[in-house]
Amino acid sequence: MKREELLNDLDWRYATKRFNQEASIDERDYQAVKEAIRLAPTSYGLQPFKIIEIEDPETRTQLQGAGYGQKQIVNASKLLAIASLKRFDNDLIDRYITLSMETRGLTEEEVSGYSNFMKGVFSQWSEEAKKSWSEKQAYLALGFGMLAAAELKIDTCALEGIDIQEVNKILQLEASDYHVSVLLALGRRAEEDQNQHAKKVRLDPSVLFETI
Ligand SMILES: Cc1cc2nc3c(=O)[nH]c(=O)nc-3n(C[C@H](O)[C@H](O)[C@H](O)COP(=O)(O)O)c2cc1C
């Protein structure tokens, strides 16, 4: 049953610490995970992030250094860096508006209200608030990617235990409008990774959920 399958897949998923370097993931499945990230909803639909696919082994080794030696960074089949906008202006909104017009065949007149509304909202926000908001959207994309991967029996590990400044330097993002929020390693678990056998540590629903 779909519901059971979903819950089984979510229980099957765990933060993979050791990937099998010999095993690869199906290219179409990997593309589907990327598509899930692309389809993730974001506030106002603005997608204030980009995803960097890191294939270069030398860059991976450097990132491992910035990631306190975590092996997933080099051993995973695929490594993504989700980089969110650390600053943005009306260009971000204009990009969305132009895309909406193209995608939905809308006229300038039809979209100008929403455009002005969004511009008005963000004009009230501090730079810090905008940066933090972008990061939240990036994490939503991370969640969608991880869920999709689990559904396709692809193992993942989100990686936040990294020296972000160093990572930004390695990925040459310092002079750009982006900074890395989180890394996502994808691949196949190594048989010897004992973490796959550990029971999930989760709050009881009665603690986590509240009805009012
Ligand atoms: C945003 C995020 C960042 C994480 N960063 C790391 C990390 O740097 N290194 C690591 O080994 N695990 C990392 N984890 C894995 C968590 O510790 C793990 O998901 C959590 O303990 C729950 O265990 P489970 O995923 O195996 O169910 C991260 C998870 C998330 C969601």
Image (cartoon, grey):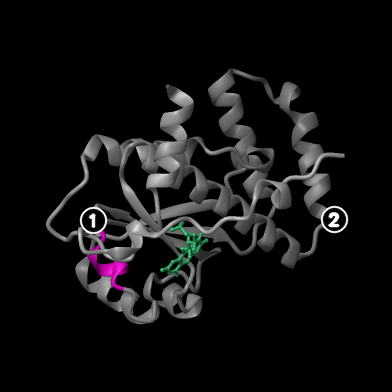
Distance of label 2 from label 1 (alpha carbons): 43 Å
Q: Is residue 90 above or below residue 151?
A: below
* Residue 41 seen in the current view: yes
Residue 43, image x and y in percent?
A: 68, 42
Image point (40%, 39%), residue name:
9
Residue 98, image x and y in percent?
A: 60, 33
- The amino acid type, in three-letter code, at marker 2 is Gln
Viewer-nearest residue: 196 or 90: 196
- The amino acid type, in three-letter code, at marker 1 is Ser
Does the stretch in magenta take in 73? yes
Residue position marked by numbered label 1 in the rendering: 77
Image point (37%, 75%), residue name:
170
Residue position marked by numbered label 2 in the rendering: 124
Viewer-nearest residue: 178 or 58: 58
Query: In the rendered structure, are the residues bearing label 2 and label 1 in contact, judged by CB atoms less than 8 Å apart?
Result: no
Among the two numbered marks 2 and 1 on one chain, the one whose residue lies closer to the N terminus: 1
Splitting the image into 4 quarters, where does residue 133 fall? bottom right
Image point (63%, 38%), residue name:
45
Image point (44%, 56%), residue name:
199
Count of numbered badges drawn on the protein:
2
Residue 135, image x and y in percent?
A: 61, 58
Does residue 29 appear left or right of residue 110 in this picture? left
Does residue 137 appear left or right of residue 189 in this picture? right
Is ligand 1 closer than 8 angstroms to the Cβ of mark 1?
A: no
Viewer-nearest residue: 168 or 147: 147
The region drawn magenta spans 71-77
Q: Is residue 4 above or below residue 148?
A: above
**Residue 122: image tag:** none
Which element carries disc 2, helix, strand or loop? loop
Q: Is residue 190 above or below residue 34?
A: below
